[in-house]
Amino acid sequence: MKIKFNLNGKNVELEAPAEKKALDILKELHINSVRKGCDEEGKCGNCSILLDGKLVNSCLLIAPQINGKNITTVEALSKGGKLHKIQQAFIDAGIVQCGYCTPAQILAVKALLDEVKKPSRQQINDALSGVLCRCTGYKQIYNALDIITKGKKPKDFTREYKKDYRVVGKITEKIDALQMVKAENSYVEDYVAPDALHIYVLGSPYPHAEIISIDTSGAEKMEGVEYILTHKNSPKTWYTQAGQSYPEPSPYDQQVINAKMRFIGDRVAAVAATSLELAKKAALKIKVRYKVLKPVFSIEEASAPGAPVIHDRDAKKLDPLDVGAIPKKNIICRNSGGIGDMDKGFKKAAVIAEAACSTPPVQHTPMEPHTAYAYMKNGRLIIHTSVQTPFHVRRIVANILGLAENKVRVIKEKVGGGFGAKQDCGVEDLVGTIAYQSGRPVYYRISRKDEFTIRTRPAMFMTVKAGADKSGKLTALSIKTKIDSGGYGPHALTVPMNGCSKTLPLFTCENMSYEVAAYYTNNIVSGAYQGYGVPQTNFTVHIVLAQLAQKLGMKFEDFLSKNLVTKGYRIDILKQLGEGREGLAQKLSSCGLQECIKQGLKKYNTWTNKKSSLGDDIVQGKGMAVMMQGSGIPGLDAANAMVKMISDGTFMLYIGGADLGTGEDTVAAKIAAEELGVNQEQIAVTAADTDTTPFDKGSYASSGTFFTGNAAYVAARNMKKLIIQSAANILKLKPSQVKIMPVGKVGTKSKNMTFKELALATQAGDGAGQLISSGAFTTQKSPIPYAAHFCQVSVNKRTGMVKVDKYHALHDCGVPINPDLAKGQVYGGVLKTIGHTLYEGMEFDKGGKCLTDTFTDYPIQNINDMPEDFEVELIEVADSITPYVGKSIGELACDGASACISVAINNACGIWMKHWPFRPEKILKELDGNGARG
Amino acid sequence: MEYFVPLSLNRAEKLKKKLKGSFYLAGGTMLNWRGAPQAKALIDLKELNTQEIEASKNKIIIGAGVTIQELALSKKVPPEIAKAAGTFTSINVRNIATVGGAAASGFFISSLLPVFAAYEAEVEYYLSGKKKSSPLAAWLKSKKGIVCAVTIKKSARKVAFTEDKIAASDFPAIVTALGIDLHGGKIANAVVAVSGAKGPLAVSEKASQYLNGLKPSAVDTCKLCAAALKDIPAAANVKVSARVKQRMIESHLASLLRKLL
Ligand SMILES: Cc1cc2nc3c(=O)[nH]c(=O)nc-3n(C[C@H](O)[C@H](O)[C@H](O)COP(=O)(O)OP(=O)(O)OC[C@H]3O[C@@H](n4cnc5c(N)ncnc54)[C@H](O)[C@@H]3O)c2cc1C
Ligand code: FES
Ligand code: FES
């Protein structure tokens, strides 16, 4: 049918089938801002448009429903290079993280402000209720509204740090926020050429099976089907998809397409065709005969004598590190160790407590699903992808295809949320192989349904036992963890090991032990998730410690304070916790934990709990938790940077680090600007392109700010030396006399030159050449970030519903380099973890099929889920490692919510919730057992 | 897929009869959900002039084409109806979804139907060439014809509702509404309506029988809950067990009684 509509002020007339979605029509008109986050479920709102001024989901409308209408998208808001005030306010308030949801949020605010001049909190919540964001925790949206409607300034919400610095610690614009608020080309989907083939993956219907035969001839005959990959023509290289530094502590247990299926959805075949619909139709024509094998769905089944063997490979021959694998027993890895003498420790204890807790698989749900686009150019394989680890991806893909690494280029585009989901080479292996073998450009966007099952956080089972003497001093602490890694083993050791290496070192206890093991099952594959195994383990540790405090009749905060590490403490247990290698014991160079607790308690101590009264089922309780993470892995991680002075005296900064929206590029730019005596605007960043930027291990393990930031620092420091040397030569001064004078000058008070003059002079025909510096950052020490979280919850004893009323998070993040973005990450991490704790959790039927692979069955938080009183405070703590020690933020933010919510629930009604998620039925069961339901 | 915009109810009905596998299209939030509509043909009701809310002396007529958001903002409908409309998952959906669609969609949960039922709403519909009217709960059993409007009598009826959601972006787990008249200090025409227990609407006869004729001060919450739960069996879903749903109904009824009596 013919439809006409007005799009952003221009009349459009086109032919479209009646059933065509407005979303697809707009995409074809190059409207980037409509983003498909939930595959047309109407839930994510990332595809929002204004239809005659009203906010609607373009995925829920078909062609005739936009006929004759006015459509406004974010693309129309900025005029002549000037941003709309809402776009500017989003940047100023530091709301923009990955930016995938940002255009929709901006439109939601526009629709609201077009109706109401000074909206209330309730009106704001309602207006934003339909746009899901997994990064920001929503809180700073109120700040943007206050900037617009009350003339407030960013500094009214976020304090600035580091008085003696000009750029670091100050509120500045996120370096890439502009392109997000304008919806310029940013994500992989924005760059796909019209002739690209689309991939559909045929997944295994069986959790455990061997392919006996596969016949693709029917599919191949279909016009438009260009290539089909099956185990027959798949490369035979064994590898791990885990995006970790080589040699990885993950097993080499897969090929691009295996002949054996190990979970429902495992790749059977991948069809590349001229459209996704066609690829899907063709995939259904593929005839496969399976030998169905007995599946195992739990660790108990997997470790039972005579259990079906899921992988029978020779681990010693294939795996890059010996992590204790026994594939024949379905064991992926094992590790154990400790310090002191556990028997002695428990003997010394006046009280002992023990808890066995479990957590189910949970999903990262980045708003942008995994996407990659690959093609061949001049004999090289080029991959544009949404990934956290471009350099690892280059190494893995080159290895799979038997290519030299310089024949593969990986370009990380903007990533619409990662959270660990995109740490792995989860789609690039397939896309790269098809592009290489077919010679055609190919694009793969995983469906939301598949996104749910491509990678999850593993199901984890923790047993923690601890003892304390009469004074409340811990005498022994042991952690035993098992994880169900599913059909393959990426990160199978890292997840449980982190659970131990980021909890045990919180305490000064002299006797500590750990034991971890990971198992193959025929469940979906697990991997990294923001926090690795720390949120789960820290939750279990807190239950046990809170029980000890209760047994001793001590306040929990007093008990904790007696046992926590302080600055200068030597953490010996870290030597043991090295993931298949020896770890590094570390003397604490800084620790802001006590300050976080002290500040947090000030407010926490004023919160009073409402107790149940007649006819009212609701009781309140409060709890607190402490936590730590790392800032990358010392002795293993590495980052590099390069700085070029260009001819007007401004700089290009090249970093390998992969910004996931968390602001890594901005951190690097700020540090470089501070060091070079210029403003942030004088630094432009090119990042995460394996051809043009230097090596960086990628964004995971909380390493971005510390590693990439400090690589930028070293490169800038080296550039500073070059500037001083060159200026001294030109100005005929001694280098020792010459100083950099902000902004953008060098020399002495009386004899100096601008950077522009210096650049022109060095780059002239008779000059010494362009100033180019590089910097590498590796370290044996990494600063440990700490935090204390406090919450108050309401429990409805009749229905089992739990609500978080108040949540305060105080973080020692070293030097808060980017304060507003840092706070935004904490809000986002906390809100997500509240979801994990209370209701998120993947469910499977008896045959291993996922029952929660949509946002209807697996709801995530919207703005109305925010605690009424939700505060984040950053505590500045100096550390001697470098002048710019920004400790990590993002992962740590996830480590406390379930711990402090479980303590608070106990405080409210006396029950211990030991198994995530604390859905109402589980609460009722505990209340029944406890006789606590009044 | 074929697409039609009939200009009369009669024409719409004829088209529907003629085109096998066709559907009436209102806002499309259900028909266009999760991919392209699975229909042979769509018969768009947009020209059938049902997009108004009319309030006369005795009744309020809510046109089937009124969007849920228009209902949420309307001053013409009782505040409790506007409030119920406002609890719909998100404004993005409310701006498109319609009252007619809410009545006819048969979706597993409804934010509106219990409140409509508590107001003893009627459905005006067009069937076999005629406009007809039927009590909501009765019409829902057959769901025949084209919904033209939902009507509510203007009266001093007291109605309240409440709901529980696992997460704010989720569909409600349970919506419970209670409607009563007070005649001579006694409860009359009581309606206890629940959505989500098992299907979009369940109305408890036993709860009405229990309440009718009682003085408000004589109502025993436990007895009311017991009566309601006898009529309204709850079925578990992946997030909420049957027991939790029952407890939600109990909790809702207790708070609704506190609110209304
Ligand atoms: C993301 C999302 C969130 C939702 N949240 C909620 C919620 O919180 N609460 C809630 O109650 N519902 C919710 N719904 C359900 C849905 O939006 C409602 O049922 C809605 O009112 C349907 O209206 P519509 O106009 O979009 O219907 P349509 O999709 O156009 O039609 C739905 C069905 O009703 C029929 N129909 C429509 N109008 C008429 C008519 N006048 N006469 C006869 N048949 C008709 C159609 O043929 C079709 O079978 C949600 C849906 C989505 C997608
Ligand atoms: S894709 Fe439209 S709401 Fe998610
Ligand atoms: S910033 Fe909202 S989804 Fe990432």
Image (cartoon, rainbow, N blue to C red):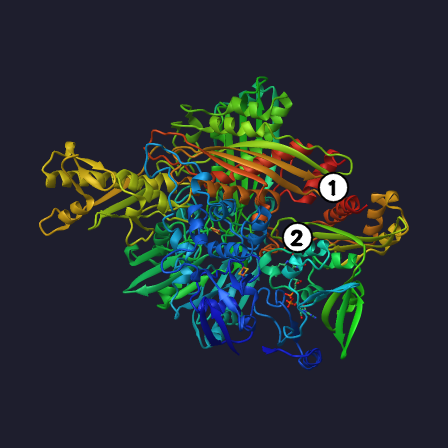
At 41% across and 31% down in the image, what residue appears?
Answer: A876
Looking at the figure, which quarter contains the C terminus of chain A? top right
Q: Is residue A675 left or right of residue A261?
A: left
Circles 1 and 2 on the same chain:
no
Where in the figure is residue A122, as x and y percent of width and height? 60, 48
Where in the figure is residue A525, as x and y percent of width and height? 51, 51
Q: Is residue A916 left or right of residue A926?
A: left
On the image, numbered disc 1 is attached to which residue? A798
Rendered position, B97 above or below A573? below
On the image, numbered disc 2 is attached to which residue? B238
| Mark identifier at residue A503 | none
- Say what amino acid the circle numbered 2 marks: Val
Nearer to me, A434 or A276: A276
Nearer to me, A685 or A217: A685
Q: Nearer the viewer, mark 1 or mark 2?
A: 1
Rendered position, A471 above or below B199? above
- Say what amino acid the circle numbered 1 marks: Arg
